[in-house]
C-alpha cells in the first residue's frame, strides 16, 4: 500500500483551471468529428470517411509531435505550451470554418493535430509533473475528473451551434472560446515553471533509483494495447451493442452509461485507490474490458448496460494511469518527453483502431471482434504483472523491478 500524499499547496485552483481548459480542448478537437464530420463532408462534396480520415491524420501527427511537445514542457514549463495550444487550436478551427474544399479542410485538421499534441492530456500531465513532482497524482486525477465531461458538454454544445449557425459557425464558436476562455485559464491561472536551479534540486531529490530498461517498452505496450481498445469502442460501441442483440434505443442508452461509469471510477481512484500504488489501479483497469466482453457474450443484448459500465470504469481509470504510472516508475525527471514517447504507439493505434475494428466487426462478427480486444487487454494485464513498484526509502521515490 502506498502512502497518501497531501495535496500540493495551491493545486486546487490549478486543477479547476486546467480541468476546465482540458474540457474545452477535448470538446473542440477530439470530440468534434462525431457531430460536425457528416455535415462538413456533405457541404464540401466529399464522403464522410474523408473527413474522418483527416481527423485520423491529425491524431497521427499528434503522436509524432508528442515527444517534442513533452520536451518543450520539460524545458519551459506547461504554462506557455498549453497557452500556445489554445492559439493553435483556435487557428485550426478558424481555418476549418473557412475551408472552401477538402484540401484546406485536411490542412486545418493537421493544424488541429499540432494543437492536440501540445494541448491535451499528455501535455497537461507533464505540466503537473513539472509543478508538483511525485505529488502530481492527485492533481492528475482531478483534471481527468473535470475533463471526463468533455463529451457530455461538447457534443450537445456542438449540436446546438450546428443547428443555430451551421458547422462553420460551430467551428468559429469553438475558436472564440479558446481565445476568450481557454487562453486566460492556461496563462493566468497556471503558475510558471520553477526556476531552473530549484527545479534541478527538486528533480534530483525526487528522482529515486533508475528504473530498469524493460519498464519503458512494457508501459509503451500497455498503453498501446489499452488505447487501441478505447479507440475501437469509442467509434463502434452502439453498433457493437446492436450486433450483440440490443435494440437501437437500448444500445444508445447503454452507451450513454460509459461517461458516468468513467467518472465514478475516477472518483474511486481519487478516494479509495489513491491509497495504493498506481500499479494496482492499472491492473484493475486492464480487467475492465475483458470482464465487460465476457458479460456481453454470455448475456447478449440485455447485458449491454453492464458491458458499458464495466468497460467505462476500466477506461476511466486507464486515463489516469497513463499519467500516474510513468510518474511512479520513472519519477518526474524528463517526464514530458518520456510521456510523449510512451504515448506515440498508443496514439497511432487509437487512430487506426476505428477502421480496423469496424472491418473486423462487419466481417467476422461480435465474438471475433471482442476476442481481439479482450486479448489486447489481457496481454496488457500480463505485461503489468511483470512490473513491481516499491518505495526506495524515506520520501516517496519509487522504482520498478
Image (cartoon, helix red, strand yellow):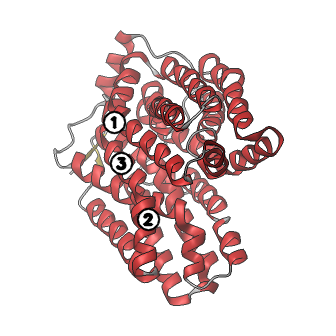
At a point 70% along the width and 35% down the height, the residue shown is: 168
Q: Residue at x 46, y 75 (%)?
A: 362
Residue 153 horizontal side relative to residue 62, left or right: right
Q: Secondary structure at mark 3?
A: helix
Note whether residue 81 is visible: yes
Residue placed most toward the observer, 274 or 118 = 118
Residue tagged 2: 284
Q: Are marks 2 and 3 in contact (CB under 8 Å)?
A: no
Can you say whether 384 is above or below 20 in the image? below
Of residue 275 and residue 285, the one placed in the foreground of this image is: 285
Query: Mark 2 near mark 1, Cβ–Cβ under 8 Å?
Result: no
> Which numbered disc, 2 or 1, marks the residue that appears first in the sequence?
1
Q: Quadrant of the N terminus?
A: bottom left
Residue 196, percent from left and from top:
37, 11
Compute the Cα span from label 2 to label 1.
Answer: 30 Å
Residue 7 appears left or right of 137: right
Amino acid at each position: 500500500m502506498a502512502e497518501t500524499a497531501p495535496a500540493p499547496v495551491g493545486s486546487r485552483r490549478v486543477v479547476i483551471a486546467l480541468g476546465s481548459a482540458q474540457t474545452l480542448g477535448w470538446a473542440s478537437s477530439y470530440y468534434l468529428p462525431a457531430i460536425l464530420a457528416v455535415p462538413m463532408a456533405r457541404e464540401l462534396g466529399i464522403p464522410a470517411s474523408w473527413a474522418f480520415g483527416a481527423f485520423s491524420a491529425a491524431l497521427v501527427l499528434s503522436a509524432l509531435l508528442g515527444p517534442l511537445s513533452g520536451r518543450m514542457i520539460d524545458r519551459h514549463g506547461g504554462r506557455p505550451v498549453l497557452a500556445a495550444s489554445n492559439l493553435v487550436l483556435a487557428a485550426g478551427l478558424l481555418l476549418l470554418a473557412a475551408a472552401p474544399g477538402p484540401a484546406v479542410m485536411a490542412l486545418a485538421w493537421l493544424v488541429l493535430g499540432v494543437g492536440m499534441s501540445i494541448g491535451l492530456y499528455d501535455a497537461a500531465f507533464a505540466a503537473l509533473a513539472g509543478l508538483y513532482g511525485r505529488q502530481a497524482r492527485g492533481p492528475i486525477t482531478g483534471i481527468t475528473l473535470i475533463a471526463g465531461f468533455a463529451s457530455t458538454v461538447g457534443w450537445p454544445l456542438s449540436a446546438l451551434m450546428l443547428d443555430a449557425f451551421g458547422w462553420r459557425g460551430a467551428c468559429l464558436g469553438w475558436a472564440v472560446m479558446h481565445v476568450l476562455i481557454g487562453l486566460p485559464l492556461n496563462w493566468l491561472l497556471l503558475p510558471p515553471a520553477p526556476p531552473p536551479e530549484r527545479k534541478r534540486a527538486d528533480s534530483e531529490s525526487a528522482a529515486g533509483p533508475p528504473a530498469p530498461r524493460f519498464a519503458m517498452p512494457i508501459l509503451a505496450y500497455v498503453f498501446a494495447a489499452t488505447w487501441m481498445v478505447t479507440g475501437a469502442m469509442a467509434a463502434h460501441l452502439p453498433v457493437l451493442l446492436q450486433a450483440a442483440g440490443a435494440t437501437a434505443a437500448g444500445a444508445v442508452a447503454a452507451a450513454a452509461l460509459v461517461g458516468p461509469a468513467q467518472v465514478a471510477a475516477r472518483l474511486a481512484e481519487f478516494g479509495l485507490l489513491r491509497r495504493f500504488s498506481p500499479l494496482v489501479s492499472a491492473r484493475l483497469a486492464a480487467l475492465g474490458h475483458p470482464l465487460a466482453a465476457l458479460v456481453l457474450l454470455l448475456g447478449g443484448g440485455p447485458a449491454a448496460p453492464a458491458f458499458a459500465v464495466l468497460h467505462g470504469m476500466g477506461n476511466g481509470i486507464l486515463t489516469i494511469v497513463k499519467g500516474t504510472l510513468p510518474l511512479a516508475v520513472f519519477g518526474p525527471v524528463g517526464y514530458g518527453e518520456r510521456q510523449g514517447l510512451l504515448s506515440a504507439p498508443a496514439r497511432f493505434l487509437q487512430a487506426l483502431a476505428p477502421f480496423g475494428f469496424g472491418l473486423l466487426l462487419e466481417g467476422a462478427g461480435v465474438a471475433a471482434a471482442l476476442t481481439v480486444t479482450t486479448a489486447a487487454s489481457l496481454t496488457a494485464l500480463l505485461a503489468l504483472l511483470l512490473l513491481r513498484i516499491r518505495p526506495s526509502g524515506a520520501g516517496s521515490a519509487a522504482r520498478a523491478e
